Amino acid sequence: MHAERKKPATGEINVNSTPTIKGIREVSVSTLNKKALEMSFEFVTKYDPDIGEIKIGGNVLYLAEKNAPILKQWKSKKSVPEEVSVEVLNHLFRRCLLKMAGMAEDLQLPPPLQLPRVKQNEK
């Protein structure tokens, strides 16, 4: 994890969060007696103008029916099938954005996700 606030936040701020799968390899999961795919990832939230950045990197295990087609596509195209990609990226959004929200709060940066706002009723 890396979080940095470069300068105070002023004016309109755009927040962009992007998860990226960086690599895939097959690993044995002894407790399940199965082979899984270990996907290394990087999740980056950038603030524009350049007032800060938050990065989380790590690995996530993915259990697939068949690993070979996913590994083959990764080796040839550096991509994964859409159904796998959607599942993994949605998981990363849920897990990483929640952690990043706390880090952003500590650094006095805007949260990386939209929070609901309560408004007073107009009379």
Image (spheres, rainbow, N blue to C red):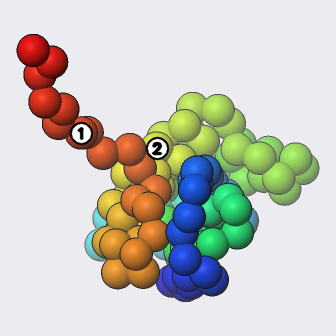
Mark yes or no: residue 17 visible. Answer: no
Q: Residue at x 18, y 32 (%)?
A: 119
Q: Residues within 10 Å of mark 2 (few under 14, many from 20)?
A: few
Would residue 5 appear left or right of 117 to someone viewing this image? right
Q: Is residue 20 left or right of residue 116?
A: right
Classed neighbour count for the residue bearing mark 1: other residues with Cα under 10 Å, few (<14), some (14–19), many (≥20) = few
Horizontal and vertical percent position of residue 80: 70, 44
Q: Is residue 1 left or right of residue 40?
A: left
Q: Position of residue 114 (x, y in %)?
A: 38, 44
Task: Write the residue at 53% across / 47% down.
Answer: 89
Tag 1: amino acid = Arg
In the picture, the quarter occupied by the C terminus is top left
Nearest the viewer among 98 and 14 is 14
Look at mark 1 in the image and give the residue it sits on: 117
Dot 2 amino acid type: Asn
Q: Position of residue 108 (x, y in %)?
A: 40, 75
The residue sitting at the right extreme is: 76
Relative horizontal placement of residue 11, taking residue 97 as reference (left or right):
right
Disc 2 element? helix
Which residue reaches farthest top?
Answer: 123
Q: Earlier in the sequence, mark 2 or mark 1?
A: 2
Residue on which the image places disc 2: 90
Q: How many marks?
A: 2
Residue 120: percent from the left, percent from the top?
Answer: 13, 30
**What residue is drawn where x is 61% and y is 81%?**
7
The quarter holding residue 37 reads bottom right
Nearest the viewer among 25 and 94 is 94
Inter-mark Cα distance, 2 to 1:
24 Å
